[in-house]
Amino acid sequence: MFKRMLIRIFLILGGVSSGIALEPIMSNKAELVFEHSFANKLSKGWRAQFGEWKAVDGVLRARQIPADNHAAAARQILEMKDGVFQMRFRLVEKGGAFHFGFDPKRGSLKKKGHLFSVIVTPKLAKITKHIDKAKPNADPNEDLAKVAHQFEAEKWHTLLLEKVGTKVAAQIKLDDGGKTLVMKASHPTFHVPTPTLVFRCVGDGVEIDDINVWQTK
């Protein structure tokens, strides 16, 4: 814990970003509309539904609570349509999965449930179009893109997700300078407005930091 704090202080004082800079591959960044680093507080508009979400040592720490019988889930209020979304994340201890995605704005789709997510587990990353809970057999979960990779616990990664019309692209880069994983997908439902950013954690746990969101040009 103390070592983690010293590293973060060094990066801040040295004027060096604690994340790896990634650039969009199918759009361009315009206005920065949201940014937050978890300096022992949660951002305005943060809403936790399940699990435990705490700002600890300058990062957001999430863990699933077994009694909830549900993945840890939280939302950041931020209405968007197209955008570029970047953050740092890592699995810690017994973290089973990290999800980042969106819900459709109410009334924008004839659908019940989430829109899509980028999902990272210890063995892979994928873009999943989520099930329509009103007609689960006709419209189930669908993995639109997938890449195998060993995501070791305690190692930070940078995620950059673009949402442009019906298309999405996700880049995941190791902060130690490793290769960048790239996934692309599209679906007719993806064009709708989204009222929040949706975060989920399976297991114990996930850490998140340095969230930045831009409009697209």
Image (tube, grey):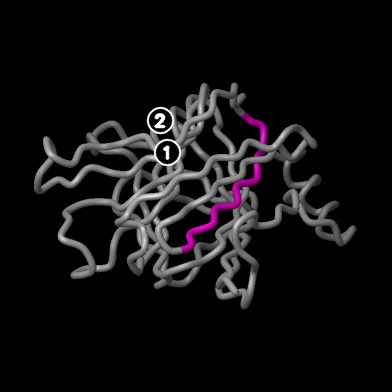
Query: Going by the picture, which residue comes out furthest to the right?
Result: 14
> Between 89 and 193, which is closer to the camera in this rendering?
193
In the figure, residue 157 lies in which quadrant?
A: top right
Q: Where residue 24 sits: x, y (%)?
A: 65, 57
Give the residue drawn at x 38%, y 59%: 75
Residue at the disc numbered 2 = 203
Q: Is residue 8 magenta?
A: no
> Between 186 and 162, which is closer to the camera in this rendering?
186
The disc placed on residue 63 is 1
User: Is residue 40 toward the left or the right of residue 74 in the image?
Assistant: right
Where are the magenta residues, as a range?
Answer: 154-164
Give the residue drawn at x 56%, y 62%: 84
**Main secondary-structure element of the magenta-colored stretch:** strand
Label 2 neighbour load within 10 Å: few <14, some 14-19, many 20+: many
Q: Is residue 157 magenta?
A: yes
User: Is residue 15 toward the left or the right of residue 33 in the image?
Assistant: right
Tell me which amino acid carries mark 1.
Arg
> Between 55 and 79, which is closer to the camera in this rendering?
79
Q: Where residue 61 sits: x, y (%)?
A: 51, 45
Q: Where residue 182 sits: x, y (%)?
A: 60, 39
Structural distance between the alpha carbons of marks 1 and 2: 6 Å
Q: Mark 1 and mark 2 in contact? Answer it, CB < 8 Å.
A: yes
Label 1 neighbour load within 10 Å: few <14, some 14-19, many 20+: many
In the figure, residue 204 lies in which quadrant?
A: top left
